[in-house]
Amino acid sequence: MKKLLLFIQVFIISLFATAQWTEVSIGNGNAPVSVIFSSNIVTGDESVVVGTDGDGIFRTTDNGTTWSDISGNIGNKSINFVDGGESIYFVGTQNGAFLTVDLADYIDNTGSGLTSSDITFYGIGTSQAGDHIYAVGTNGGGLFTSENFSGPWNNANSGISGDGLFINNLRGYYDPEDVTYNVLATKGGVYFTFDGMVTWTQKNNGLTGDALFVSDAYALGTATVISTHAGLYYTVDFGDTWVNLIPDIKINKFLMATRQSGPAFFVFGESNLYSVDLVNWFPIDMGGFAVGEVLTATVNADYIFIAPVNQTRDGNAGGVLFKAPYEMVVGMDEQTAQVDADLRQNAPNPFSQKTEFSYNLKGNGLVSLNIIDLQGRKVVSLINEFQVKGEYSKTFDAGHLPEGVYFYQLSVGNESVATKKMVIVK
């Protein structure tokens, strides 16, 4: 009898030890979850928005304890895409592009010029001058742009064809001193543009088979990372060559989240992994989640939310959604993966106008180089991008800064590598 009681106790403890993921009810009808979104860029906005395939949009501000139906007067409740923050959301549906600024009144911005109203992306790209260009991606009709968020929409498919007309996402990067570009993730590979989305160049060199299904793309400075149905890849030459970071897994969702400790990266799909440097990847603890492949996901400050591909529920209505405390399923001890680097003294130093910083990066990672004043305030961000190992240099024009003593700090991932002093004389 004592052995039986001991077995029961151990069994119960093991259940609590592995059941990190819990199912969440959002209060909708029978429609499956199609998209989950949380803006971790907008300070203080930790809300999570869930789009469904037929029941509209739901929002929580208390990590999924309660939900509000924010579908309002939206013209179509089959949701493909959500982006934004606080009370402003761009929404792509199976029949139109909508914008809300108050979580209730949706403006139909489908406008004129679109050849398809099945919207898979609705948001903002960048022009050569760094200005916003509004863009709409469609399911088979390609990409359309406008100077106004409501259109009229102009065909922006020069260079795009075939399965490339099925748009999954669009990202932009602007640096007036270096490079400005947009990258397009499609079902037919990846495309780059350097002229404000006027013309596109397909860059699928080395990508074949399932790797041509690009689920997402991130423009991390001069490096670009893409997730595909055959793994995670990056390029530092705008697609001329691709390096496989995670091979042979189907990735449905790739996320970069802003954490207090620095950026964190996640992939969800057939396997679920996280990283702080895009090089060292660790498995996410999926205890309590036995539904298989993850379709979509998001991360806020406290929780990770996921929805499975198979959303069949026994006797219950509504889409299937799970959540888990971030620090319970992501091993904090493994988040300290570091990449070493050597930061050299700037030259010339002291200087009046221009100086050069140089460093040797001994591994791949997200690199930042900042200028800091004597009060500890960041006054200039010189570099903030993913870089591969090697030698780097950066010229800095200090003409706009007053003379005095400053520091420059190099960080890789979440860790500061080195801080050195420099002097500006006028």
Image: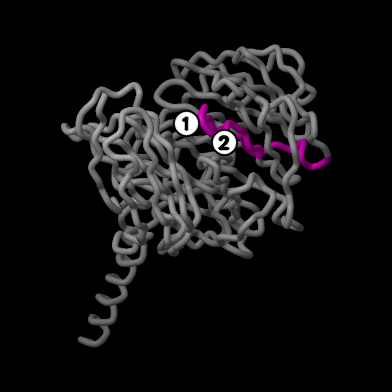
Q: In this view, does 35 lie above or below 292?
A: above
Start and end of the magenta stretch?
Answer: 162-184
**Amino acid marked by disc 2:** Thr
Q: In this view, does 329 lie above or below 123?
A: below
Contact? badges 2 and 1 (CB < 8 Å): yes
Tell me residue 12's x, y (percent): 29, 70
Residue of label 1: 58
**Amino acid marked by disc 1:** Phe
Tell me residue 9's x, y (percent): 25, 75
Quadrant for residue 102, please give it: top left
Query: Tag 1, which secondary structure?
Result: strand
Q: Report whether 226 appears left or right of 376.
A: right
Query: Tag 2, which secondary structure?
Result: strand
- Reply yes or no: does residue 168 show up in magenta: yes
Tell me residue 98's x, y (percent): 59, 20
Q: Which residue is drawn at 29% across and 44% down?
A: 409
Q: In which quarter of the image is the C terminus?
A: top left
- Reply yes or no: does residue 82 show up in magenta: no
**Sequence-earlier tag: 2 or 1:** 2
Residue of label 2: 52
